[in-house]
Each structure stands twice: as structure tokens, then as C-alpha cells.
Amino acid sequence: MTNDVKEIFNGSGVGPGRPGGEAAPAPAALAAKVRTLAPSMTRSMQRVAEAVAADPAGCAALTVTGLAELTGTSEATVVRTARLLGYPGYRDLRLALAGLAAQQQSGRAPSVTADIAVDDPIADVVAKLAHDEQQTLADTAAGLDTIQLGAAVTALAAARRTDIYGVGASGLVAQDLAQKLLRIGLIAHAHSDPHLAVTNAVQLRAGDVAIAITHSGSTGDVIEPLRVAFDHGATTVAVTGRPDGPVSQYADHILTTSTARESELRPAAMSSRTSQLLVIDCLFTGVTQRTYETAAPALSASYEALAHRHSPRTR
């Protein structure tokens, strides 16, 4: 075992993105991390990640050498995978695997999957979709960086103006956030037209916020206005399922959503929207808390303005 591998295995190395040796993710977050990060890993690291996700109990009993042999990789690959998943060393990953195995043995493992077949009865479709939605939300909650979320909330609460960029299904999520912010008295605009997005981004400056919503992290029509906003000094936020994607280059704060499995009958655009909406709700709720003295009256006024539309008309 090389010296650098020994150092990380013994827990003295600090993983990427965890300055100062922050606490490793809880066992419940491990499976979510694997599902989210596996698509961006090298093939050898994917084999390690897939092995620990498929058999946490078995892998928890293995040494770093044993897991490397099981997956046909090297000790260094195992350690790099552990660090990418957020653990200072392999020893910490083993502890999390043991915890995850205990949770699964307690009967909390899912009983259905979201592999929907063309001839599935509608009752099975409902059960599978409901399970998939629950898993997506749980994965997003487990993997969401609350420090980044808090910083984004702080910026939004104090923003002179907020621009939100999204196209396709992500455009619907962008509109949802803009409407929510408007109802608590904040200035917010959602842009799905790439030309309008860029021309509006040019007007942003320090004290403004720009938010890009992109599941893939590589949507050019969303990245371009975020880059312009970034260059003009606005605080930038990316809501994405690929935190290592191109959008991250221009994001001051990154909020990661779950990368749900897609299928022929349920494309990624449908499943990703669930996790995006959770993040949007977290942002909105946090901002409402920070601006409660002004947000509460604004919400009351908006409810009052619409009340007559929800009551039977009198002749």
C-alpha cells in the first residue's frame, strides 16, 4: 500500500470539497451519493461505487485490498471513490456501509422499483412512481449541502433583483420560484427564452442574484446567461444534478439535486423536476423566514387579492 493511500485509509486525508475535515455523510446519505455521483465517475470508480451500493454489508467486511480485488480495481481507486463520496478515508466509508446495512436489515429496504413495463397494471404504475418520487426526494434531501443552501437564501433575501434561467421542464421550475418570490414582495423574473435571458443578465450587478436550473449541468441556453450574470458581479446559484458539470464554473453556490434513474416510459425531465421543486421550496421557505416581517404581509395581501376568485360568485 503506497504512503498516500495509507494516509487516506487511516483517515488523515481530507476529501475534496470538505475543507478542515468536515464530518462525513451519514449512512442514509451514502446511497444517495452513489446514485448522484456514479454517472460522473470513471468506469473503475463506478465499479467500486456500484459494489458498495449493491452489497453494503459484504463490502463493510472487506479491507481496502479486499474491495479492490472484488471490483478488479486498485487500492488507490477504492480510496479515491471513498473520498469522492465524501469520506476522509476508506475506514469512514466502511463505517457508513455498516450503518447502511443495518438500516436495510431493519426492513426499510424498498419493496418496489420504478422499472415500469408497458403492460403493468395501473395500480403497479402508481406504486412504482410513488416509490420513485419518494426515493428522489430522500436522495435530494440527503445530498443537499445546507451550508450552500443557507448562503443562497441569504443572497436571495437581500437581493435587489433575482433572475432565474431554465428551459423545458426546468423552465417550469424557474417560473414556480419566480412566482413564489413575487408573492412575498421580491422582484424576480423567470427566463426560458435564451436571448431575453442574456439581455436581462447584462443588467445585473453586485447585489443581484442569478439562478440557473439545469438537470444535466450542461444546458448552453442556461449556462450563457449565468456566465454573463457572473461576469457582471451578481451572486450566482446553480440547481443541478451534475455538480461537476460546466454550469458549476459560473456558480458561487451549487445546490445538487438527485439524479433519478430514467426509463423509456419516464424520461429524466420528469423525474428530475421532483428534486428541483424540493430545492426551490427549500430556497423559498428559507427566504420567507429571513424576510418574515415583510413577507407575511405580502403573502396575506396576495391571498386577499385572489380570495374572491375562490369563492362562489353571487348574483
Image: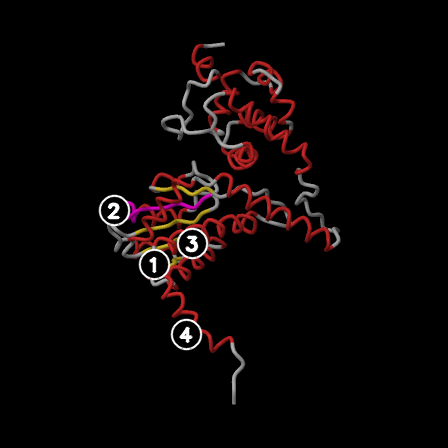
Q: Which residue is mark 2?
A: 233
Give the class, few, some or many, for how many residues have Cα within 10 Å of label 3's Cα (few <14, many ≥20).
Answer: some
Q: Three-letter amino acid code at disc 1?
A: Leu
Q: Quick check: 296 above or below 280?
A: below
Of marks 3 and 4, which one's residue comes earlier in the chain?
A: 3
Q: Which mark identifies residue 305?
A: 4
> How far, Cα to Cα, is label 1 from label 2?
19 Å
Of marks 2 and 4, which one's residue comes earlier in the chain?
A: 2
Question: Could you say whether the residue bearing mark 4 is in a helix, strand or loop?
Answer: helix
Q: Three-letter amino acid code at disc 3?
A: Thr
Image x and y of residue 55, in percent: 64, 27
> How far, Cα to Cα, is label 3 from label 4?
22 Å
Q: Which residues are magenta?
A: 228-240
Q: Which mark identifies residue 16?
A: none
Q: Are marks 1 and 2 in contact (CB under 8 Å)?
A: no
Q: Which residue is mark 1?
A: 196
> How far, Cα to Cα, is label 3 from label 2?
25 Å
Q: Which residue is mark 3?
A: 285
> How far, Cα to Cα, is label 2 from label 4?
36 Å
Q: Work out whether residue 308 or residue 274 is closer to the camera in this orientation and state it.
A: 308
Q: Three-letter amino acid code at disc 4?
A: Ala
For discs 1 and 2, the disc positioned in front in the rendered view: 2
Direction from residue 13 to residue 105 in the image, left or right: right
Image x and y of residue 264, in percent: 63, 47
Residue visible at 43% across and 46% down in the picture: 239
For discs 1 and 4, the disc positioned in front in the rendered view: 4
Magenta stretch: includes residue 200: no
Q: Quick check: 175 above or below 301?
A: above
For discs 1 and 3, the disc positioned in front in the rendered view: 3
Q: Are marks 2 and 4 in contact (CB under 8 Å)?
A: no
> How far, Cα to Cα, is label 1 from label 4?
30 Å
Give the class, few, some or many, for how many residues have Cα within 10 Å of label 2's Cα (few <14, many ≥20).
Answer: some
